[in-house]
Image: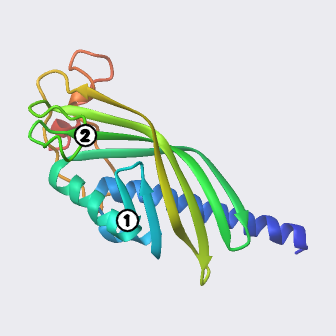
Amino acid sequence: MDEATRATIERLSSEAEISRLLHLYCHAADTVDRAAFRSVFHADSTHDHAGIFKGLSRDFCDFALGVFEADVPVTQHHLSNILIELDGDRARSSCYFLAYHLVPASMSAEVMTGHRRGRDEVYWVGGRYLDRLERRRGVWKIAHRTAVHDWAQWDDVRDGGYRRPARLRGASIFFPLEHSLTHNEPGSVQLGERMK
């Protein structure tokens, strides 16, 4: 194998491993999988999350998953536009995220600024994850993450609320929420009923 081919394979392999890390972060957040969430960060990784948290990434994991586990029954984090720049055993990545949070009426406004207590709401956040990554002992992980919130929006949950789903810890699939479409709209799904 020539040097150019070897370099291309190495680049593609590193990009795939980094992309997988970015997606694993989202999956672990949405399933409240603490071990998987921590696994994307080096032990000394730092985190600056949109003015909400600044410190060690392992402490951010406890903070964020503590909120999700106690107060936010459903989240979905989606990634797009992933860009990765490699420099030996170091890399930088940038990607867009769109995060959905189902916030129940009982949640305190101090936990999520902007929430109107007494209303079931959906909190949407669009932004970017800006990461510095390092390959140590052959494994890529995040050494520093900056999360930027470019926009946020609060929406009331329509049509009389939602049915609280069981938290899907460690799950590999998610079920759509009943309230995403009214029962009369095309494409309406009553998956919870079908799965019984």
Quarter-wise, where is residue 19 in the image?
bottom right
Residue 180: x and y in percent read 27, 28
> Dividing the picture into quarters, in which one does residue 38 lie?
bottom left
Instruction: Give, as a three-letter code, the residue at label 1.
Output: Phe
Task: Say if 26 sits above or below 14 in the image.
Answer: above
- What colouring does the structure picture have? rainbow
Residue at the right extreme of this rendering: 2
Q: Of label 1 and label 2, which has the lower sequence position?
A: 1
| Residue 23 drawn at (x, y percent) | 48, 55
Tag 2's secondary structure?
Answer: loop
The residue that mark 2 highlights is: 113
Mark 1 crowdedness (10 Å alpha carbons): few <14, some 14-19, many ≥20: many
Residue 42 makes an appearance in the image: no
**Circle 2 Cα neighbour tier, 10 Å, few/some/many (<14 / 14–19 / ≥20):** few
Residue, far bottom:
137
For image coordinates 53% across by 60% down, the residue present is 20
Q: How many marks?
A: 2
Q: Is residue 190 above or below residue 144?
A: above
What separation in Å lies between label 1 and label 2 (alpha carbons)?
Answer: 24 Å
Say whether residue 144 is left or right of residue 119. right
Nearer to me, 102 or 53: 53
| Residue drawn at point x = 33 percent, y = 68 percent | 59
Could you tell me which quadrant the N terminus lies in?
Answer: bottom right
Tell me the SS state at disc 1: helix
> Are the residues flagged by discs 1 and 2 in contact, CB closer than 8 Å?
no
Residue 182 appears in the figure: yes
Residue indicated by mark 1: 37
Q: Residue at x 66, y 55 (%)?
A: 84
| Residue at x 47%, y 41% (from the top left corner) | 127
Label 2 sits on what residue type? Thr
Compared with 126, 68 (above or below) is below
